[in-house]
Image (cartoon, grey):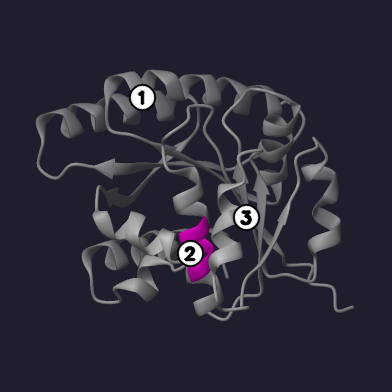
Amino acid sequence: MEVNLNMKVISVANQKGGVGKSTIACNLAVCAVKDGKKTMLIDADPQGSSLSFRAIRESDDLKAVSITQPTIHKDMGGFESFDLVIIDAGGRDNTLFRSAVTAASRGILLIPVLPSQYDIWAAEDTFKILKEARVFVEIPAYAVFNQTIQNTTISKEAKETLEELTAESDIKLLESVLFSRVDYKKSISQGLGVVEYQAKGKASEEMHSLYTEIKGILGF
């Protein structure tokens, strides 16, 4: 088997549920395979949303497995034939979640955050887990706003608050922003990424922007 020593990892994680981890993980995976990257999608959430997405996806271009034991960071060596491994981490603070966070030492930790004060405060729990994991390994971490409502005061205030908190935790806020759009739900239900479902739509543009920004960070 060909070994790819340049394999990168994106762990999509936030302890809070409902922030769109699975949607982002699946869409980034589709962007990667469309970009010619051999991609593995790991579903580390017992709910199995990402694995369900793969099950209804007709194209066989994306590989997916479920790992619900706290061995993800140890298992990364078995996926070195892939260019990119994307981990959809569950939302509870347990050894499985922390394993997914630790695996990000081979790439980046991506923390989706909803643009509300409550959700930003809730994200601090994930920031604390990251801080604890960084005692043992170096983990580059980035936050991204998801399900944003355009041109609202609360979104502007939320950005200011998140920028302060991420700076304190050595987490960078990505320039890319994902908005609340129906295309995300419609495409996922068909086993498609938004870049496939509506290639010229707004959701496709912003997901492509996110993938391109992350690709630049990872250097591939």
Please state which amino acid type lies under the numbered disc 2: Gly
- For the record, the magenta segment spans 26-30
Viewport quadrant of the N terminus: bottom right
Rendering coords of residue 90 (x, y %): 60, 36
Looking at the magenta stretch, what is its main secondary structure?
A: helix
Q: Residue furthest right?
A: 1
Q: Is residue 29 inside the magenta stretch? A: yes
Q: What residue is pinned by disc 1?
A: 119
Name the N-terminal-most of marks 3 and 1. Answer: 3
Above or below 150: residue 65: below
Please state which amino acid type lies under the numbered disc 1: Asp
Name the N-terminal-most of marks 2 and 1. Answer: 1
Viewport quadrant of the C terminus: bottom right
Rendering coords of residue 104 (x, y %): 66, 45
Rendering coords of residue 116 (x, y %): 27, 26
Secondary element under disc 1, as helix, strand or loop, is helix
Q: Are marks 3 and 1 in contact (CB under 8 Å)?
A: no
Q: What residue is pinned by disc 3?
A: 51
